Image (spheres, helix red, strand yellow):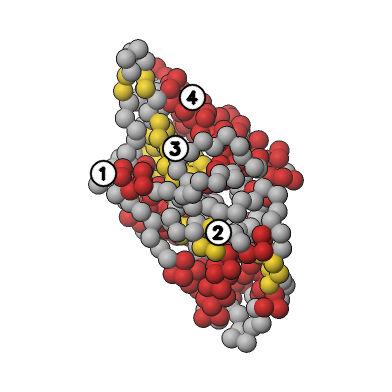
Amino acid sequence: MSTFTQKTILITGAAGFIGANLVKKLLKDYDAKSIVGIDNVNDYYDVSLKEYRLQELDILAQTSDIEWVFLRGNIADKKMIEDVFETYHPDIVVNLAAQAGVRYSITHPDVYIESNLIGFYNILEACRHSYDNGAKGVEHLVYASSSSVYGSNKKVPYSTDDPVDHPVSLYAATKKSNELLAHAYSKLYDIPSTGLRFFTVYGPAGRPDMAYFGFTNKLVKGEKIKIFNFGNCKRDFTYVDDIVEGVIRVMQRAPERKKGEDGLPVPPYALYNIGNSHPENLLDFVDILQQELIRAGVLPVTYDFEAHKELVPMQAGDVPVTYADTSALERDFGYKPSTSLRDGLRKFAEWYKQFYGSQK
């Protein structure tokens, strides 16, 4: 396996759930020259979680040979992005900064346009101009897409070969737009780019707006949890460490630059699903979660779950099933996520007890 020797890696969304875990893994196990993180540390969810992740990275960086630089800024700020590229000359760019969440996009569309469209455009432009005046420039742009682009596709498992022209949320539309923009820039400017469609990522210090975290917060407060589509939903839950391993493998091998018969670049562009390829029924998921919360001591053994569960209809923007076909990832990188839901939720429950136990 190749390494990142003497390379500078730029990671946007570095205080986010996947971003922070990616930086952590690189600082611990790899040999880059420097890692530059950008994040606007917004208050879409509890900022103390983002600060906690950043604190972990600062502590880790003290024992790492890799230089760690963190910049608070918004990727929608074009001048800031230009300055970062001019100062640090990144070899690999991983764009994870985005406004996440399907439901939030229904009520707050502006932030999705700003971060997911304007912000991503700024990253693409900076990559394009990194080659100016014969400079070596960016070797590989890796960016986060989402399983939400599959919308209400009836065919499962979802394959990157499937048409995804009917998004059911603005969030999904912005992620599909990212893929289209990246393809155009790959074609026009020969920028090697790889998009990754993530499937329901979970784990310790994750996002509180995700079901497993939100359910836990509600149960701890004695509130009812709503299980949508009367429990007839399936999700391809993917543990964060599996996502990070997939991202790192992809980072190390950019799509090949080559010319077509017309003498113009064939777009050095690739797209992969990263998911567990094992959809879990939401009711089974809740059952495992409650067992692990009791085991970790987050909830008492006597907790009455039935009294705190409410089965409700589907809500706007949601889909009944997510299911990743990861055969392309296996074929090209010899990798398939494998952490079981029980193992992943156990790690989350133990973290939750440790983090919130010490906060009270």
Q: Which residue is mark 2?
A: 234
**Which quarter of the figure is the C terminus placed in?**
bottom right
The one nearer the camera, 260 or 15, is 260
Q: Residue furthest right?
A: 107
Q: Position of residue 93 (x, y in %)?
A: 43, 37
* Distance from the alpha carbon under mark 2 to that under mark 3: 21 Å
Q: Determine which residue is flagged by label 4.
A: 184
The tag earlier along the polypeptide, 2 or 4, is: 4
The residue pinned by badge 1 equals 2
Residue nearest the viewer, comparing 92 with 157: 157
Where does the image place residue 202, in percent across and percent down from the top left? 51, 60
> Residue 161 bears which disc, if any?
3
The residue that appears at 26% across and 44% down in the rendered structure is 2
Three-letter code, disc 3: Asp
Q: Nearer the viewer, mark 2 or mark 4?
A: 2
* SS state under label 1: loop
First-in-chain label (1 vs 4): 1
The residues tagged by marks 4 and 3 sit, at their Cα atoms, a distance apart of 18 Å
The mark that comes first in sequence, 1 or 3, is: 1
Tell me whether the residue at label 1 lies in contact with that at label 3, contact meaning CB atoms closer than 8 angstroms: no
Secondary element type, mark 2: strand
